[in-house]
Amino acid sequence: MVFERIAARASWFLFVFVGLIGGQPMMPSCWGQPTSVVSATGTDSVSSPVRNVLLIMADDLKASVLGCYGDPHCQTPNLDRLAAKGLLFEHAYCQATWCAPSRRSMMFGRYRDQANVTLGQQLQDHAAYTARVGKIFHMRVPGDIIAGIDGLDQPKCWTERFNSPGPETHTPGLYACLNQNLFTRQLANRQSTKMPHRMFVTVQSDGDGTRQADYKAASQAIELLKQRRQSDQPFFLAVGLVRPHYPMVAPSHYFDDYPVDRIAMPANWKDDTSDIPKQGRAATTNARNSIGDFPENQKQMWSGYYASVAFMDAQVGRILDALEQHQLADSTAVIFTSDHGYHLGEHGWWQKSNLHEEVIRVPLIVRVPQQARGRSKSMVELIDLYPTVCQLMSVPTPAVAEGKSLLPVLQDPLKRLRQGALSIHNGHSLRTDHWHYMRYTDGSEELYDMQQDPGETRNLAGEPTPSKELLQMRQALQQRLREIKTVN
Ligand SMILES: [Ca+2]
Protein backbone atom coordinates (compact mmCIF):
# COMPACT_ATOMS: atom_id res chain seq x y z
CA MET A 1 0.00 0.00 0.00
CA VAL A 2 2.84 2.31 0.89
CA PHE A 3 4.47 1.46 -2.41
CA GLU A 4 1.23 2.22 -4.21
CA ARG A 5 1.11 5.65 -2.62
CA ILE A 6 4.72 6.34 -3.46
CA ALA A 7 4.14 5.21 -7.04
CA ALA A 8 1.07 7.43 -7.35
CA ARG A 9 2.98 10.41 -6.03
CA ALA A 10 5.99 9.64 -8.22
CA SER A 11 3.89 9.47 -11.38
CA TRP A 12 2.27 12.76 -10.50
CA PHE A 13 5.56 14.51 -9.87
CA LEU A 14 6.90 13.03 -13.10
CA PHE A 15 3.96 14.57 -14.91
CA VAL A 16 4.68 17.96 -13.38
CA PHE A 17 8.39 17.65 -14.02
CA VAL A 18 7.85 16.76 -17.65
CA GLY A 19 5.41 19.65 -17.90
CA LEU A 20 7.97 22.03 -16.44
CA ILE A 21 10.96 20.96 -18.48
CA GLY A 22 8.77 21.22 -21.56
CA GLY A 23 9.05 24.95 -20.99
CA GLN A 24 5.82 25.78 -22.73
CA PRO A 25 2.32 24.89 -21.60
CA MET A 26 0.37 22.42 -23.64
CA MET A 27 -1.70 24.56 -25.95
CA PRO A 28 -4.81 23.64 -27.83
CA SER A 29 -4.38 22.81 -31.47
CA CYS A 30 -7.86 24.13 -32.05
CA TRP A 31 -10.67 25.65 -30.06
CA GLY A 32 -13.54 23.46 -31.13
CA GLN A 33 -16.29 25.87 -32.03
CA PRO A 34 -15.17 29.16 -30.51
CA THR A 35 -17.46 32.03 -29.72
CA SER A 36 -15.94 35.49 -29.58
CA VAL A 37 -17.05 37.45 -26.53
CA VAL A 38 -16.34 41.03 -25.57
CA SER A 39 -16.68 41.83 -21.88
CA ALA A 40 -18.79 44.72 -20.63
CA THR A 41 -15.59 46.65 -20.09
CA GLY A 42 -14.94 46.34 -23.80
CA THR A 43 -11.25 45.74 -23.24
CA ASP A 44 -10.81 42.05 -23.75
CA SER A 45 -12.01 39.43 -26.07
CA VAL A 46 -11.84 35.70 -25.58
CA SER A 47 -12.88 32.55 -27.31
CA SER A 48 -14.36 29.98 -24.98
CA PRO A 49 -13.85 26.29 -25.69
CA VAL A 50 -16.68 25.25 -23.34
CA ARG A 51 -20.38 25.83 -22.79
CA ASN A 52 -20.74 24.95 -19.12
CA VAL A 53 -18.95 25.45 -15.82
CA LEU A 54 -18.94 23.09 -12.83
CA LEU A 55 -17.73 24.82 -9.66
CA ILE A 56 -16.91 22.61 -6.67
CA MET A 57 -16.08 24.33 -3.39
CA ALA A 58 -14.74 22.80 -0.22
CA ASP A 59 -15.08 24.58 3.12
CA ASP A 60 -12.13 25.65 5.32
CA LEU A 61 -9.69 23.70 3.13
CA LYS A 62 -6.05 24.73 3.32
CA ALA A 63 -4.27 24.15 0.02
CA SER A 64 -1.20 22.54 1.56
CA VAL A 65 -2.99 19.34 2.67
CA LEU A 66 -3.81 18.19 -0.85
CA GLY A 67 -1.53 15.63 -2.47
CA CYS A 68 -1.25 17.76 -5.60
CA TYR A 69 -0.10 20.67 -3.41
CA GLY A 70 2.64 18.53 -1.88
CA ASP A 71 1.21 16.88 1.23
CA PRO A 72 2.93 13.48 1.52
CA HIS A 73 0.20 11.84 3.63
CA CYS A 74 -3.28 13.00 2.68
CA GLN A 75 -5.00 10.78 0.12
CA THR A 76 -6.64 13.02 -2.48
CA PRO A 77 -6.50 10.94 -5.68
CA ASN A 78 -9.49 12.61 -7.32
CA LEU A 79 -8.28 16.16 -6.87
CA ASP A 80 -4.83 15.00 -7.93
CA ARG A 81 -6.25 13.63 -11.18
CA LEU A 82 -8.20 16.84 -11.74
CA ALA A 83 -4.95 18.76 -11.25
CA ALA A 84 -3.16 16.44 -13.68
CA LYS A 85 -5.73 17.33 -16.33
CA GLY A 86 -5.92 21.02 -15.53
CA LEU A 87 -4.01 24.02 -14.22
CA LEU A 88 -3.10 24.18 -10.52
CA PHE A 89 -2.66 27.68 -9.12
CA GLU A 90 0.08 27.67 -6.48
CA HIS A 91 -0.64 31.24 -5.45
CA ALA A 92 -4.41 31.61 -5.13
CA TYR A 93 -5.70 33.77 -2.27
CA CYS A 94 -9.08 34.52 -0.72
CA GLN A 95 -10.21 38.09 -0.12
CA ALA A 96 -11.83 37.53 3.28
CA THR A 97 -10.79 35.14 6.01
CA TRP A 98 -14.01 33.33 6.91
CA CYS A 99 -17.00 31.82 5.16
CA ALA A 100 -19.58 34.58 4.76
CA PRO A 101 -17.51 37.52 3.47
CA SER A 102 -15.23 35.34 1.35
CA ARG A 103 -18.08 33.59 -0.45
CA ARG A 104 -19.99 36.87 -0.84
CA SER A 105 -16.94 38.57 -2.35
CA MET A 106 -16.39 35.70 -4.76
CA MET A 107 -20.00 35.48 -5.90
CA PHE A 108 -20.57 39.26 -6.21
CA GLY A 109 -17.15 39.82 -7.75
CA ARG A 110 -16.44 42.68 -5.35
CA TYR A 111 -13.81 43.07 -2.67
CA ARG A 112 -16.05 44.33 0.06
CA ASP A 113 -19.53 45.36 -1.05
CA GLN A 114 -22.36 43.90 -3.12
CA ALA A 115 -22.49 46.56 -5.84
CA ASN A 116 -22.99 44.01 -8.59
CA VAL A 117 -25.44 41.31 -9.57
CA THR A 118 -24.47 37.86 -8.34
CA LEU A 119 -22.58 35.65 -10.73
CA GLY A 120 -25.57 33.35 -11.12
CA GLN A 121 -27.91 36.25 -11.84
CA GLN A 122 -25.58 37.57 -14.54
CA LEU A 123 -25.42 34.14 -16.16
CA GLN A 124 -29.20 33.70 -16.01
CA ASP A 125 -29.66 37.13 -17.57
CA HIS A 126 -27.75 35.73 -20.53
CA ALA A 127 -29.82 32.59 -20.92
CA ALA A 128 -27.86 30.14 -18.77
CA TYR A 129 -29.26 27.66 -16.27
CA THR A 130 -27.69 28.00 -12.82
CA ALA A 131 -27.99 25.61 -9.89
CA ARG A 132 -26.67 25.48 -6.34
CA VAL A 133 -26.19 22.26 -4.44
CA GLY A 134 -25.16 22.65 -0.81
CA LYS A 135 -23.16 25.57 0.58
CA ILE A 136 -22.08 28.29 -1.83
CA PHE A 137 -23.10 31.45 0.01
CA HIS A 138 -22.67 31.21 3.77
CA MET A 139 -24.39 28.49 5.75
CA ARG A 140 -23.63 27.80 9.39
CA VAL A 141 -21.89 24.47 9.74
CA PRO A 142 -23.14 22.33 11.31
CA GLY A 143 -26.35 24.16 12.38
CA ASP A 144 -27.81 25.02 8.96
CA ILE A 145 -26.66 21.67 7.56
CA ILE A 146 -28.43 19.70 10.28
CA ALA A 147 -31.54 21.84 9.74
CA GLY A 148 -31.26 21.64 5.94
CA ILE A 149 -31.88 25.38 5.52
CA ASP A 150 -30.61 28.03 3.11
CA GLY A 151 -28.40 30.11 5.40
CA LEU A 152 -27.42 33.41 3.77
CA ASP A 153 -28.14 32.21 0.25
CA GLN A 154 -29.00 34.64 -2.56
CA PRO A 155 -32.13 33.12 -4.16
CA LYS A 156 -31.91 35.14 -7.39
CA CYS A 157 -28.50 33.65 -8.07
CA TRP A 158 -30.05 30.30 -8.94
CA THR A 159 -32.51 28.81 -11.38
CA GLU A 160 -32.75 25.88 -8.98
CA ARG A 161 -31.19 25.24 -5.59
CA PHE A 162 -30.87 22.19 -3.40
CA ASN A 163 -29.85 21.98 0.24
CA SER A 164 -28.00 18.93 1.43
CA PRO A 165 -28.77 18.12 5.06
CA GLY A 166 -26.82 15.66 7.16
CA PRO A 167 -26.55 14.45 10.76
CA GLU A 168 -23.10 16.00 11.25
CA THR A 169 -22.07 15.82 14.92
CA HIS A 170 -24.95 13.44 15.66
CA THR A 171 -23.67 10.71 13.36
CA PRO A 172 -23.32 7.33 15.17
CA GLY A 173 -19.71 6.44 15.84
CA LEU A 174 -16.79 7.54 18.00
CA TYR A 175 -17.31 11.19 18.91
CA ALA A 176 -14.37 13.17 20.24
CA CYS A 177 -14.32 16.68 21.62
CA LEU A 178 -10.56 17.07 21.57
CA ASN A 179 -10.55 20.35 23.50
CA GLN A 180 -12.26 18.61 26.41
CA ASN A 181 -10.37 15.33 25.95
CA LEU A 182 -13.82 13.75 25.73
CA PHE A 183 -14.41 10.53 23.79
CA THR A 184 -17.74 8.74 23.62
CA ARG A 185 -19.87 6.53 21.45
CA GLN A 186 -23.06 7.77 23.10
CA LEU A 187 -25.36 9.80 20.88
CA ALA A 188 -27.18 11.55 23.71
CA ASN A 189 -26.07 15.01 24.82
CA ARG A 190 -23.64 15.65 21.97
CA GLN A 191 -23.42 19.38 21.52
CA SER A 192 -23.00 20.64 18.02
CA THR A 193 -24.00 24.15 17.08
CA LYS A 194 -23.27 26.76 19.72
CA MET A 195 -20.93 25.19 22.24
CA PRO A 196 -17.50 26.84 22.51
CA HIS A 197 -15.59 23.61 21.77
CA ARG A 198 -17.36 22.80 18.52
CA MET A 199 -14.30 23.43 16.32
CA PHE A 200 -12.46 20.59 18.09
CA VAL A 201 -15.00 17.85 17.31
CA THR A 202 -14.32 14.75 15.22
CA VAL A 203 -16.64 11.79 14.57
CA GLN A 204 -15.29 8.47 13.32
CA SER A 205 -18.54 7.34 11.76
CA ASP A 206 -19.85 3.77 11.90
CA GLY A 207 -21.67 4.22 8.61
CA ASP A 208 -20.54 4.23 5.00
CA GLY A 209 -20.90 8.00 4.67
CA THR A 210 -24.05 7.94 2.54
CA ARG A 211 -26.02 9.91 5.15
CA GLN A 212 -23.47 12.73 5.17
CA ALA A 213 -24.24 16.09 3.58
CA ASP A 214 -21.35 15.90 1.12
CA TYR A 215 -22.32 12.45 -0.12
CA LYS A 216 -25.88 13.67 -0.72
CA ALA A 217 -24.62 16.85 -2.39
CA ALA A 218 -22.54 14.80 -4.81
CA SER A 219 -25.54 12.55 -5.53
CA GLN A 220 -27.71 15.60 -6.26
CA ALA A 221 -25.01 17.05 -8.50
CA ILE A 222 -24.79 13.76 -10.38
CA GLU A 223 -28.55 13.78 -10.90
CA LEU A 224 -28.42 17.35 -12.23
CA LEU A 225 -25.60 16.48 -14.64
CA LYS A 226 -27.72 13.63 -15.94
CA GLN A 227 -30.63 16.04 -16.48
CA ARG A 228 -28.52 18.79 -18.07
CA ARG A 229 -27.13 16.37 -20.58
CA GLN A 230 -30.57 16.42 -22.20
CA SER A 231 -30.65 20.23 -22.45
CA ASP A 232 -29.18 22.64 -24.98
CA GLN A 233 -29.06 25.40 -22.37
CA PRO A 234 -25.56 26.14 -20.99
CA PHE A 235 -25.29 25.45 -17.25
CA PHE A 236 -23.39 26.73 -14.25
CA LEU A 237 -23.54 24.09 -11.52
CA ALA A 238 -22.10 25.16 -8.16
CA VAL A 239 -21.59 22.36 -5.65
CA GLY A 240 -20.64 23.34 -2.12
CA LEU A 241 -19.15 20.58 0.05
CA VAL A 242 -18.86 21.28 3.78
CA ARG A 243 -15.82 19.20 4.73
CA PRO A 244 -13.22 19.64 6.09
CA HIS A 245 -15.14 22.30 8.08
CA TYR A 246 -15.82 21.05 11.62
CA PRO A 247 -17.29 18.78 12.86
CA MET A 248 -14.79 16.54 11.11
CA VAL A 249 -17.10 13.61 10.35
CA ALA A 250 -16.07 10.75 8.07
CA PRO A 251 -16.41 6.95 8.01
CA SER A 252 -13.90 5.48 10.43
CA HIS A 253 -11.78 3.82 7.75
CA TYR A 254 -10.78 7.27 6.52
CA PHE A 255 -9.33 7.95 9.97
CA ASP A 256 -7.47 4.62 9.90
CA ASP A 257 -5.17 6.00 7.18
CA TYR A 258 -3.91 8.73 9.54
CA PRO A 259 -2.97 7.25 12.94
CA VAL A 260 -1.62 9.86 15.32
CA ASP A 261 1.74 8.10 15.66
CA ARG A 262 2.38 8.98 12.01
CA ILE A 263 1.29 12.61 12.29
CA ALA A 264 4.01 15.24 12.59
CA MET A 265 2.95 18.69 13.69
CA PRO A 266 4.00 21.54 11.37
CA ALA A 267 7.44 23.05 11.88
CA ASN A 268 6.01 26.36 13.04
CA TRP A 269 3.57 24.92 15.56
CA LYS A 270 5.22 26.39 18.64
CA ASP A 271 3.75 29.57 20.03
CA ASP A 272 5.81 32.27 18.28
CA THR A 273 3.32 35.10 18.49
CA SER A 274 5.32 37.60 20.55
CA ASP A 275 6.23 39.66 17.47
CA ILE A 276 2.73 39.52 15.95
CA PRO A 277 0.50 42.56 16.54
CA LYS A 278 -2.72 42.07 18.47
CA GLN A 279 -4.90 42.63 15.38
CA GLY A 280 -2.96 39.99 13.49
CA ARG A 281 -3.50 37.14 15.92
CA ALA A 282 -5.97 34.30 15.55
CA ALA A 283 -8.75 34.11 18.12
CA THR A 284 -8.60 30.34 18.72
CA THR A 285 -5.26 29.47 20.29
CA ASN A 286 -3.47 26.89 22.40
CA ALA A 287 -3.10 29.55 25.07
CA ARG A 288 -6.85 30.10 25.36
CA ASN A 289 -8.01 26.53 24.82
CA SER A 290 -7.26 23.38 26.70
CA ILE A 291 -6.19 21.59 23.51
CA GLY A 292 -2.89 23.32 24.23
CA ASP A 293 -2.57 20.86 27.14
CA PHE A 294 -3.16 17.78 24.94
CA PRO A 295 -0.41 17.35 22.32
CA GLU A 296 -1.84 13.99 21.20
CA ASN A 297 -5.23 15.59 20.63
CA GLN A 298 -3.58 18.22 18.44
CA LYS A 299 -2.38 15.37 16.24
CA GLN A 300 -5.90 13.94 16.29
CA MET A 301 -7.09 17.25 14.86
CA TRP A 302 -4.77 16.63 11.92
CA SER A 303 -6.03 13.05 11.64
CA GLY A 304 -9.66 14.24 11.59
CA TYR A 305 -8.88 16.98 9.09
CA TYR A 306 -7.07 14.56 6.77
CA ALA A 307 -9.94 12.06 7.05
CA SER A 308 -12.47 14.79 6.23
CA VAL A 309 -10.42 15.97 3.25
CA ALA A 310 -10.14 12.41 1.94
CA PHE A 311 -13.91 11.89 2.30
CA MET A 312 -14.57 15.20 0.52
CA ASP A 313 -12.13 14.15 -2.21
CA ALA A 314 -14.08 10.93 -2.73
CA GLN A 315 -17.25 12.95 -3.36
CA VAL A 316 -15.40 15.13 -5.87
CA GLY A 317 -14.40 11.91 -7.60
CA ARG A 318 -18.03 10.76 -7.89
CA ILE A 319 -18.99 14.09 -9.50
CA LEU A 320 -16.04 14.01 -11.92
CA ASP A 321 -16.90 10.45 -12.90
CA ALA A 322 -20.48 11.51 -13.66
CA LEU A 323 -19.22 14.34 -15.83
CA GLU A 324 -17.36 11.78 -17.92
CA GLN A 325 -20.20 9.26 -17.87
CA HIS A 326 -22.68 11.78 -19.25
CA GLN A 327 -20.31 12.96 -21.98
CA LEU A 328 -20.10 16.47 -20.51
CA ALA A 329 -16.38 16.55 -19.76
CA ASP A 330 -15.41 18.02 -23.13
CA SER A 331 -17.95 20.84 -22.95
CA THR A 332 -17.63 21.69 -19.25
CA ALA A 333 -14.90 23.57 -17.40
CA VAL A 334 -14.28 22.40 -13.82
CA ILE A 335 -13.17 24.76 -11.07
CA PHE A 336 -12.25 23.49 -7.61
CA THR A 337 -11.47 25.80 -4.70
CA SER A 338 -12.23 26.64 -1.05
CA ASP A 339 -13.48 29.79 0.68
CA HIS A 340 -10.28 30.13 2.76
CA GLY A 341 -7.64 28.06 4.50
CA TYR A 342 -7.23 26.97 8.10
CA HIS A 343 -4.84 26.77 11.02
CA LEU A 344 -4.08 23.38 12.53
CA GLY A 345 -1.65 24.42 15.25
CA GLU A 346 0.69 26.71 13.30
CA HIS A 347 1.87 29.50 15.64
CA GLY A 348 -0.20 27.76 18.34
CA TRP A 349 -3.36 28.72 16.45
CA TRP A 350 -6.50 26.98 15.26
CA GLN A 351 -9.17 27.93 12.75
CA LYS A 352 -9.28 31.07 10.61
CA SER A 353 -10.01 34.81 10.58
CA ASN A 354 -6.47 36.17 10.41
CA LEU A 355 -4.26 37.17 7.50
CA HIS A 356 -1.49 34.58 7.70
CA GLU A 357 -0.59 32.26 4.86
CA GLU A 358 -2.38 29.18 6.17
CA VAL A 359 -5.68 31.10 6.14
CA ILE A 360 -5.49 33.24 3.01
CA ARG A 361 -3.99 30.68 0.64
CA VAL A 362 -6.61 28.50 -1.05
CA PRO A 363 -6.46 25.58 -3.44
CA LEU A 364 -7.48 26.48 -6.97
CA ILE A 365 -7.55 23.96 -9.80
CA VAL A 366 -9.12 24.85 -13.14
CA ARG A 367 -9.58 22.25 -15.84
CA VAL A 368 -10.64 23.62 -19.19
CA PRO A 369 -10.69 21.11 -22.04
CA GLN A 370 -7.93 21.73 -24.57
CA GLN A 371 -6.33 24.34 -22.33
CA ALA A 372 -3.01 24.51 -20.53
CA ARG A 373 -2.09 21.89 -17.97
CA GLY A 374 0.46 22.05 -15.20
CA ARG A 375 1.05 24.67 -12.54
CA SER A 376 1.04 28.44 -12.43
CA LYS A 377 2.70 30.79 -9.97
CA SER A 378 0.58 33.73 -11.09
CA MET A 379 -0.89 35.63 -8.11
CA VAL A 380 -4.64 35.15 -8.41
CA GLU A 381 -7.65 35.87 -6.24
CA LEU A 382 -11.02 34.21 -5.66
CA ILE A 383 -12.60 37.42 -6.91
CA ASP A 384 -11.19 36.48 -10.31
CA LEU A 385 -13.62 33.57 -10.62
CA TYR A 386 -16.55 35.86 -11.46
CA PRO A 387 -15.09 37.19 -14.73
CA THR A 388 -13.49 33.81 -15.42
CA VAL A 389 -16.82 31.97 -15.31
CA CYS A 390 -18.49 34.70 -17.37
CA GLN A 391 -15.86 34.43 -20.07
CA LEU A 392 -15.88 30.64 -20.07
CA MET A 393 -19.65 30.75 -20.60
CA SER A 394 -19.48 33.47 -23.26
CA VAL A 395 -21.34 35.94 -21.06
CA PRO A 396 -20.21 39.58 -20.68
CA THR A 397 -18.63 40.51 -17.36
CA PRO A 398 -20.28 43.53 -15.69
CA ALA A 399 -17.96 46.53 -15.60
CA VAL A 400 -18.31 46.75 -11.80
CA ALA A 401 -16.82 43.29 -11.29
CA GLU A 402 -13.39 43.86 -9.74
CA GLY A 403 -11.54 40.64 -10.49
CA LYS A 404 -9.53 39.71 -13.55
CA SER A 405 -10.35 36.79 -15.80
CA LEU A 406 -7.99 33.85 -15.46
CA LEU A 407 -8.34 33.02 -19.16
CA PRO A 408 -4.99 34.63 -20.06
CA VAL A 409 -3.29 32.42 -17.45
CA LEU A 410 -5.20 29.37 -18.63
CA GLN A 411 -3.75 30.02 -22.06
CA ASP A 412 -0.26 30.82 -20.75
CA PRO A 413 0.50 29.76 -17.15
CA LEU A 414 3.48 32.14 -17.09
CA LYS A 415 1.16 35.13 -17.58
CA ARG A 416 0.98 37.47 -14.57
CA LEU A 417 -2.24 39.33 -13.76
CA ARG A 418 -1.01 41.43 -10.85
CA GLN A 419 1.95 41.94 -8.53
CA GLY A 420 0.27 40.73 -5.38
CA ALA A 421 -2.93 39.25 -3.95
CA LEU A 422 -5.08 41.35 -1.62
CA SER A 423 -6.87 40.03 1.47
CA ILE A 424 -8.90 41.91 4.07
CA HIS A 425 -9.33 41.41 7.82
CA ASN A 426 -8.66 44.06 10.50
CA GLY A 427 -6.72 45.79 7.74
CA HIS A 428 -5.10 44.45 4.60
CA SER A 429 -2.61 41.88 3.41
CA LEU A 430 -0.61 42.01 0.20
CA ARG A 431 1.05 38.74 -0.78
CA THR A 432 3.65 38.89 -3.54
CA ASP A 433 5.92 36.11 -4.83
CA HIS A 434 8.59 37.02 -2.32
CA TRP A 435 6.94 38.98 0.47
CA HIS A 436 3.87 38.95 2.66
CA TYR A 437 2.92 42.31 4.15
CA MET A 438 0.07 43.07 6.53
CA ARG A 439 -1.03 46.48 7.74
CA TYR A 440 -3.78 46.63 10.34
CA THR A 441 -6.29 49.39 11.08
CA ASP A 442 -4.30 50.52 14.11
CA GLY A 443 -1.19 50.98 11.94
CA SER A 444 0.64 47.88 13.20
CA GLU A 445 2.40 45.77 10.57
CA GLU A 446 3.88 42.41 9.68
CA LEU A 447 6.35 41.57 6.95
CA TYR A 448 7.64 38.10 6.07
CA ASP A 449 10.22 36.90 3.60
CA MET A 450 8.21 34.00 2.16
CA GLN A 451 11.19 32.50 0.39
CA GLN A 452 13.41 32.37 3.48
CA ASP A 453 10.66 31.98 6.07
CA PRO A 454 7.55 30.34 4.55
CA GLY A 455 6.23 29.52 8.03
CA GLU A 456 6.07 33.24 8.89
CA THR A 457 8.04 32.94 12.12
CA ARG A 458 10.02 36.20 12.00
CA ASN A 459 8.14 39.47 11.59
CA LEU A 460 10.54 41.79 9.75
CA ALA A 461 8.32 44.84 10.22
CA GLY A 462 9.53 45.16 13.80
CA GLU A 463 13.11 46.14 12.95
CA PRO A 464 14.26 49.50 14.43
CA THR A 465 14.96 50.90 10.96
CA PRO A 466 12.41 50.13 8.21
CA SER A 467 14.01 48.02 5.52
CA LYS A 468 13.92 48.88 1.84
CA GLU A 469 11.51 45.97 1.36
CA LEU A 470 9.15 47.21 4.06
CA LEU A 471 9.03 50.66 2.48
CA GLN A 472 8.37 49.07 -0.93
CA MET A 473 5.58 46.88 0.37
CA ARG A 474 3.95 49.82 2.18
CA GLN A 475 3.95 51.68 -1.10
CA ALA A 476 2.73 48.67 -3.08
CA LEU A 477 -0.24 48.16 -0.74
CA GLN A 478 -1.16 51.85 -0.88
CA GLN A 479 -0.99 51.74 -4.66
CA ARG A 480 -3.12 48.60 -4.78
CA LEU A 481 -5.78 50.12 -2.52
CA ARG A 482 -5.91 53.20 -4.74
CA GLU A 483 -6.52 51.02 -7.79
CA ILE A 484 -9.50 49.08 -6.48
CA LYS A 485 -12.95 50.46 -6.11
CA THR A 486 -14.31 49.51 -2.73
CA VAL A 487 -11.62 49.12 -0.08
CA ASN A 488 -10.76 52.19 1.97
CA1 LIG B 1 -15.36 28.37 5.50
Image (cartoon, rainbow, N blue to C red):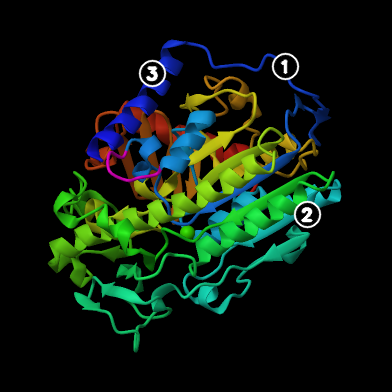
Answer with mark 3 or mark 1, whichever residue precedes in sequence: 3
Q: Nearer the viewer, residue 318 or 21?
A: 318
Residue hosting label 3: 17
Q: CA distance from mark 2 to mark 3?
A: 41 Å
Task: Tell me residue 361's x, y (percent).
Answer: 42, 43
Q: Is residue 100 left or right of residue 281?
A: right
Residue highlighted by disc 1: 30
Judged from the image, the secondary structure of the residue bearing numbered disc 3 is helix
Residue drawn at x 76%, y 25% as measured from the top left: 47
Q: Residue at x 23, y 61 (%)?
A: 300
Q: Which residues are magenta?
A: 71-76
Percent x, y of residue 98: 47, 59
x, y percent for residue 252 = 31, 64
Question: 224 or 359: nearer the eye?
Answer: 224
Asked if the residues shown at circle 2 and circle 1 are in contact, with their CB atoms under 8 angstroms apart, the answer is no
Please tell me which of labels 2 and 1 falls first in the chain. 1
Q: Which residue is mark 2?
A: 121
Residue 223 drawn in magenta: no
